Image (cartoon, grey):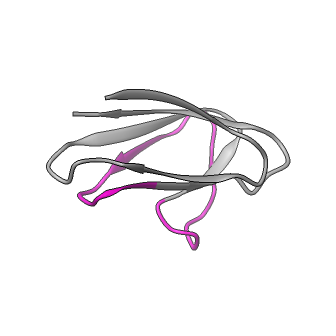
């Protein structure tokens, strides 16, 4: 799976990922909160390696768009 997302300011989303898959996120532009609402924001040009679970939740709390790619398989 290769997905390219752009979240508008103040938007949130959830993407299901099969639990047996390995996955990571690369943030291209902006800053977002990944995983849980209590997590610290992560800025552009960072990679997040995801642990096992049923998906990825993302919040864009900033006033600028957030663009990132999710790779899993």
Hey, which residue is sitting farthest bottom in the picture? 38
Q: Position of residue 49 (x, y in %)?
A: 35, 46
Q: Quadrant of residue 71?
A: top left
Which quadrant, please, contains the N terminus? top left
Q: Nearer the viewer, residue 15 or 60?
A: 15
- Please state the total of marks drawn on the protein image: 0
Return the residue nearer the eye: 2 or 33: 2
Horizontal side of 53 relative to 40 (left or right) equals left
Task: Look at 64% across and 50% down and name the residue there.
Answer: 32
Tell me which segment is drawn in magenta.
Answer: 35-56
Instruction: Give the answer, above or below, for where 40 lies relative to 9.
Output: below
Residue at horizontal 75 percent and vertical 42 percent from the top:
8
x%, y% of residue 18?
22, 48
Looking at the image, which is closer to me, 6 or 68? 6
Q: Main secondary structure of the magenta part?
A: loop
- Residue in the picture at 44% in, 29% down: 3
**Where residue 10 appears, x then y in whole percent?**
77, 54
The residue depicted at 68 percent of the width and 46 percent of the height is: 31
In the displayed structure image, the side of residue 67 where residue 35 appears, left or right: left
Residue 24, image x and y in percent?
A: 36, 40
Q: Is residue 43 magenta?
A: yes
**Can you name the residue that lies furthest to the right here?**
63
Q: Quadrant of the C terminus?
A: top left
Left or right: where 53 falls relative to 66: left
Q: Which image quadrant is residue 30 in?
A: top right
The answer to whether residue 29 is magenta is: no
């Amino acid at each position: 799976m290769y997905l390219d997302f752009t979240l508008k300011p103040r938007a949130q989303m959830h993407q299901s990922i099969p639990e047996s898959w390995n996955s990571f996120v690369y943030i291209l532009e902006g800053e977002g909160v990944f995983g849980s609402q209590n997590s610290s924001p992560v800025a552009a040009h960072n990679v997040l390696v995801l642990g096992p679970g049923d998906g990825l939740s993302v919040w864009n709390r900033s006033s600028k768009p957030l663009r990132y790619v999710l790779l899993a398989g």
